[in-house]
Image: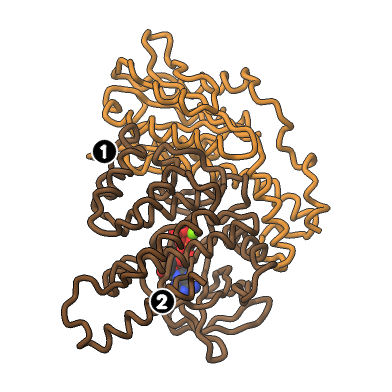
Chain colours: A orange, B brown
């Protein structure tokens, strides 16, 4: 199972625990954190850009700052790379066991073909959970239609795979102060559930990114919607098929 | 991991490179193009001109090679000549070598040679799609830059990076050709996915401005009715319109049926070749030979 938190934000956090620390905690729980910084005009600012990079780094994921019209593509690409990356990691371990090297290019071409075939089959069938965490502070208002489009697009792609794929959506800040983050869409693989998102949303000024990440980690750990064998090197019999 | 992977390639034109496994040597002559997965070069090997695709990521390259190998199993002329890695300035690059296709894009070809040629081009594309579908695969990333038309109007579909086994999720696609982008279904690889993309390719040729405007709309406004309107607004290509409408509404039962219907439309048009609006055309030998060439192509494709 691949668990990913995908944070979409347009600036700096300003309340609560440091989001970099929260992201490190996610990684500890085998949840990868990717971050997209989104802007329409103007700049995300030096501070924001730094923070985005650091959150992703701590969360074992990747980051990118893009304009609204690149958002859907970026979300797709990050999810695909996260899946490929995790699987490559497992496959590399197996390659190392079987061939003493983990570099594809050190394998003879015919062995390589098999290794990549195994990788692709796993990519197609491994269960995926994506929790989208959407910054809905006031400055994000104009960007929410693009965010929704990107989520719908991701949903269609997850649904098109053979393996299970589900997403859920959180936004923050929530309405009351204590309630830092709000679940806007529970686990689903149905794109029609995505369309009503954010329709009545009151935007607020604070950006408690760190607390929001912690909340989503708890939620992902406690929800057992997808039950499937975990991705552990020992359980996947690729050794025989490669060598 | 980093999103800006290592999308830099410092390769010099004129250099000779040698594969580390098969030891074949290639001179890099010219850069033919580049895309999301890598760069393609015109290369020379033993006096032969070939095309070499060099990948940013060896996994992506191997994936494409696997697909080509699977398709080639039951195919006549070979498409992959070599698969290997070369090192250049201390960096290792994975590549494969394929035939070099000299040509231009569909739009350019039709602009230079007349709109009737679109019928010939479309028939060539459909023939290739049907053949891929018969082998259990879907092409996936059909788009303008992945079709090369040669001087005879014959065209070649290139870039198998998106080709996917039927039933799996399409590996690579481009938004305006993707039916899901228009709210018309999933990204599960099936024959309709390619026929839809082909229809979009036709719309792009028939009414490029209309399509460009529609593609920029918000998702809730992007839909099939809008596409239908763009088709009907196209200035020419009246004979093609019913085919395109069937393609975007996914009402063919298979790509084979789509191909057969295309041929029916072609027979109707080829009876009034591309002569219509020209006066004194008989004065131009080049024009006559162009018409002959057109009719030969049509004849060749239909029988
Ligand atoms: N065999 C060939 N002969 C001539 N030109 C070619 C050939 N293969 C590729 N090209 C040129 O190189 C360009 C890039 O090739 P290709 O589409 O395979 O790369 P890519 O990285 O997979 O691109 P994409 O972003 O479309 O997935 C093509 O658009 C075409 O112009
Ligand atoms: Mg490609």
> How packed is label 2: few (under 14 Cα within 10 Å), some, or many (20 or more)?
some
- Position in image of residue A84 (x %, y %): 60, 47
User: Mark 1 and mark 2, same subunit?
Assistant: no
Q: Please name whichever residue, B93 or B80, is drawn nearer the observer in this view of the structure.
A: B80
Residue corresponding to mark 1: A40
Q: Determine whether, in the image, residue B234 is placed left or right of residue B66.
A: left
Identity of the residue drawn at 43% across and 51% down: B174
Q: Residue B244: tell me if it is visible.
A: yes
Identity of the residue drawn at 37% across and 76% down: B294
Q: Determine whether, in the image, residue B303 is placed left or right of residue A239.
A: left
Do callouts 1 and 2 mark residues in contact (Cβ within 8 Å)? no
Q: Residue A37, located in which quarter of the rendered image? A: top left
- Position in image of residue A215 (x %, y %): 51, 19
Q: Determine whether, in the image, residue B99 is placed left or right of residue B284.
A: right
| Mark 1 → mark 2, Cα distance in angstroms | 42 Å
Identity of the residue drawn at 47% across and 23% down: A193
Host chain of mark 1: A
- Position in image of residue A112 (x %, y %): 70, 62
Above or below for B168 versus B155:
above
- Position in image of residue A201 (x %, y %): 33, 16
> How packed is label 1: few (under 14 Cα within 10 Å), some, or many (20 or more)?
some
Tell me the tag on residue B150. Answer: 2
Identity of the residue drawn at 26% across and 40% down: A43
CB at mark 1 closer than 8 A to ligand 1? no
Q: Residue B6: tell me if it is visible.
A: no
Q: Residue A233, located in which quarter of the rendered image? A: top right
């Amino acid at each position: 199972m691949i668990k990913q938190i995908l944070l979409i934000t347009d600036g700096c956090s300003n309340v609560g625990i440091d989001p970099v620390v929260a992201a490190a905690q996610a990684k500890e729980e085998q949840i990868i954190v990717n971050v997209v910084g989104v802007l329409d005009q103007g700049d995300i600012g030096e501070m924001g850009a730094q923070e985005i990079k650091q959150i992703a780094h701590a969360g074992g994921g990747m980051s990118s700052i893009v304009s609204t019209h690149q958002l859907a593509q970026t979300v797709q690409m990050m999810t695909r790379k996260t899946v490929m990356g995790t699987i490559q990691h497992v496959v590399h371990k197996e390659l190392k066991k079987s061939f003493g090297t983990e570099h594809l290019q050190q394998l003879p071409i015919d062995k390589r073909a098999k290794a990549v075939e195994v990788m692709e089959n796993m990519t197609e069938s491994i269960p995926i959970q994506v929790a989208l965490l959407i910054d809905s502070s006031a400055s994000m208002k104009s960007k929410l239609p693009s965010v929704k489009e990107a989520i719908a697009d991701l949903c269609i792609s997850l649904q098109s795979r053979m393996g299970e794929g589900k997403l859920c959506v959180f936004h923050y800040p929530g309405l009351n102060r204590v309630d830092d983050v709000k679940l806007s869409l529970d686990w689903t693989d149905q794109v029609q559930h995505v369309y009503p998102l954010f329709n009545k949303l009151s935007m607020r000024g604070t950006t408690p990114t760190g607390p929001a990440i912690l909340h989503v980690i708890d939620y992902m750990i406690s929800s057992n919607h997808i039950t499937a064998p975990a991705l552990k090197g020992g359980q996947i019999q690729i050794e025989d098929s490669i060598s | 991991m980093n999103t800006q992977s290592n999308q830099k390639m410092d390769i010099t034109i004129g250099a000779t490179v040698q594969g580390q496994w098969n030891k074949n040597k290639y001179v890099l002559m010219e850069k033919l193009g580049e895309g999301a997965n890598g760069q393609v070069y015109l290369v020379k090997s033993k006096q032969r001109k070939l095309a070499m695709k060099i990948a940013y990521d060896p996994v992506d390259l191997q994936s494409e090679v696997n697909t080509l190998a699977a398709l080639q199993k039951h195919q006549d002329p070979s498409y992959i000549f070599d698969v290997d890695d070369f090192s250049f300035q201390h960096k290792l690059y994975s590549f494969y070598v394929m035939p070099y296709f000299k040509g231009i894009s569909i739009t350019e070809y039709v602009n230079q040679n007349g709109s009737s040629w679109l019928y010939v081009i479309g028939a060539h594309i459909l023939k290739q799609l049907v053949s891929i579908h018969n082998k259990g695969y879907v092409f996936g990333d059909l788009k303008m830059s992945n079709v090369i038309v040669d001087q005879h109007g014959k065209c070649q579909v290139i870039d198998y990076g998106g080709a996917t086994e039927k039933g799996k999720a399409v590996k690579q696609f481009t938004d305006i050709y993707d039916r899901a982008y228009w709210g018309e279904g999933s990204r599960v690889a099936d024959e309709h996915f390619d026929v839809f993309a082909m229809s979009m390719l036709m719309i792009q040729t028939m009414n490029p401005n209309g399509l460009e405007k529609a593609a920029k709309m918000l998702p809730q406004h992007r839909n099939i009715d809008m596409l239908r309107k763009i088709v009907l607004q196209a200035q020419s290509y009246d004979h093609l319109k019913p085919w395109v409408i069937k393609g975007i509404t996914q009402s063919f039962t298979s790509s084979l049926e789509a191909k057969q219907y295309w041929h029916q439309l072609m027979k109707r048009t080829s009876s009034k070749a591309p002569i219509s609006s020209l006066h004194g055309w008989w004065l131009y030998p080049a024009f006559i030979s162009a018409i002959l060439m057109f009719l030969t192509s049509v004849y060749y494709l239909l029988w």
